[in-house]
Image (tube, rainbow, N blue to C red):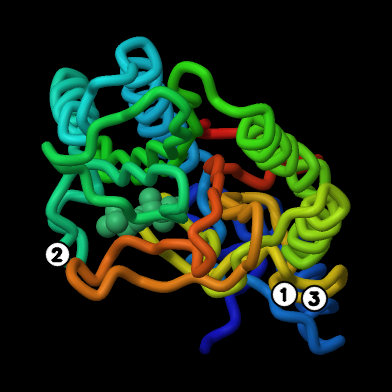
Amino acid sequence: MKKIGRNDPCWCGSGKKYKVCHEAMDEKILVFKEKGCIVPTHDLIKTPEQIAGIRESGKVNVAVLDAVASEIKAGMSTEDIDRIVARVTKEYGAVAAPLGYEGFPKSVCTSINSQVCHGIPSEEDILEDGDIINVDVSTIYKGYFSDSSRMFCIGNVSEEMRRLVDITKQSIQVGLEQVKPWNFLGDMGEAIHTFIKEHGYSVVRDIGGHGVGLEFHEEPFVSYVSKKGTEMLMVPGMVFTIEPMVNMGTDEIFIDAENDWTVYTDDNMPSAQWEVTVAVTEDGYEILAW
Ligand code: MF3
Ligand code: CO
């Protein structure tokens, strides 16, 4: 690769000279790389314009989730949730990213109780009093992708299951506190894992978060069972999801053999998940969708 001259335009497309744009950051990244750390490639570092685009996409994602929040109730099918997501997404002139993604048949993932993630909306799955459900919405707006999910408690949910939902939500905040430049993704992953274990739950190992923004799923893979000081270095402009799946019992999971999508806990105990899309800023983080 040809080295960029200091007076050449920056690789990020800002139009500024390299020396006043990303040169200092690149030099800092190189120091980490030479120490053997995993560092982001340039394509994982978004420009302010791209982040603005993902932020707008995130606003639609949040509006879709807000619409679900205002309508969700016992007696409704998960297909009804799919219809809300499809309708509101369209009203905003956006596209639901899941529909047709690697063959996924619906506009949203709906995962009830022991379903860990990737539940497929269906006319047959009716929300009952006492259920917990994850609604995972992903939006494409003007070419930019955002991805976030929330848990909903339907009617009278047991104290035990409410606690699972609350602790999982709190774990996102615990993770966010580790999101700042020159920390590692593993700092965030270990913080979440430690917090979850302290509360007696387990974290799913095999499925995690991902870079997001220009595509639905970008590098890096974001684990929540990683170790401090490992995994990719966090650099301003990176955008990824934090989306731990937290199980009341075992962390073992299996995939539905019939639809090849829906993930369940092995022991049939409940699972919860919250998801945010987050950007690394100059001094911390910005939530782009929740
Ligand atoms: N929203 C899921 C995630 O957080 C994506 C699932 S892929 C789909 O990564 F096709 F099922 F939508
Ligand atoms: Co995601």
Above-or-below relation of 74 to 245: above
At mark 3, the secondary structure is loop
Q: Is residue 12 visible?
A: yes
Q: Nearer the viewer, mark 2 or mark 3?
A: 2
- How far is mark 2 from mark 3, CA to CA? 33 Å
Q: Which residue is mark 2?
A: 103
Which residue lies at the image location 57% right of the left edge and 54% below the top edge? 245
Tell me which amino acid carries mark 3: Thr
Residue behind label 1 places its C-beta within 8 angstroms of ligand 2: no
**For this view, does 26 lie left or right of residue 195?**
left
How far across and how far down the image is residue 178, in percent?
A: 82, 49
In contact (CB < 8 Å): disc 3 and disc 1: yes
Q: Of the residues under marks 2 and 1, which one precedes in the sequence?
A: 2
The answer to which of 259 and 68 lies nearer the viewer is 259
How far across and how far down the image is residue 3, in percent?
A: 59, 82
How far across and how far down the image is residue 288, in percent?
A: 53, 34
Q: Of the residues under marks 2 and 3, which one precedes in the sequence?
A: 2
Which residue lies at the image location 80% right of the left edge and 88% below the top edge? 36
**For this view, does 236 lie left or right of residue 213?**
right
Tell me, for residue 261, which label it has, or none: none
Q: Which residue is mark 1?
A: 231
Tell me, for residue 230, which label it has, or none: 3
Above-or-below relation of 159 to 269: above
Q: Is residue 181 visible?
A: no
In contact (CB < 8 Å): disc 2 and disc 3: no
